[in-house]
Amino acid sequence: MRKRVPLITLTTGTVVLETIVIWTVGAQSSLALAPQVSAPAPYGVFHDIRWLLVYHESWLGFVLELIALLLFRTALTTALVVLAWPDDRHASPRPSWRDLARRSAVATGIGAVALLPFAVLLFAMAVVSLSWLFFVAVPVLVMRRRAVRLARSCSRSER
């Protein structure tokens, strides 16, 4: 357990730090997001993207915050993997910091690109009451696909 103290300190420390920052800037309604800062991928990346989408005021700010997001998440993921890597003789050897950082950067970038549309949809549905559209549109899309299949099979059987 003593070997895991740095890992526990890093994971809880980042949560405490984000909680203090959120409390200080007066965004108490967002305190529930703080524990997600130390979450593993892809949850941590999704957490960061949600903050990025809310707190930027220009395209330049968005790009700079995106770069900061990628650097922070890469560094945090790399540190968490290094601290969580088993050090017993049966474990595979840990890759170097450089290799882990490169892999973390690639995974963070791919995760950010993949999750960005879903984060945008999440905000769009939260800002405007669109849930009724979602619940109506999904069954219609599913039924439409089924109807197209039936129409194709009927037209083939008539030939």
Image (tube, rainbow, N blue to C red):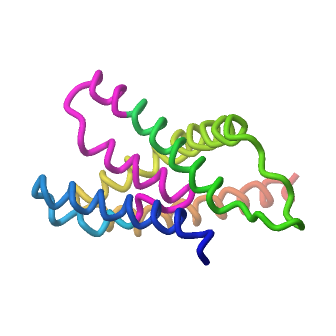
What range of the chain is rendered magenta?
A: 36-65
Vertically, is 70 above or below 88? above
- Determine the main secondary structure of the stretch shown in magenta: helix
| Residue occupying the far front of the picture | 2
Query: Is 5 situated left or right of 120 in this image?
Result: right
- Residue 127: image location, x then y, percent: 22, 55
The verdict on residue 56 being magenta is yes
* 140 or 23: nearer the viewer: 23
Determine which quarter of the picture holds residue 106. Answer: top right
On-image quarter of the N terminus? bottom right
Query: Is 13 situated left or right of 140 in this image?
Result: left
| Residue occupying the far left of the picture | 26
Query: Is 108 situated left or right of 92 in this image?
Result: left
* 22 or 117: nearer the viewer: 22
| Residue occupying the far bottom of the picture | 1
* 59 or 123: nearer the viewer: 59
- Residue 128: image location, x then y, percent: 22, 56
> What's the residue at 69%, 42% (across, down)?
100
- Residue 92: image location, x then y, percent: 86, 58
> What's the residue at 52%, 63% (across, down)?
6
- Residue 110: image location, x then y, percent: 60, 40
> What's the residue at 64%, 59% (across, down)?
145
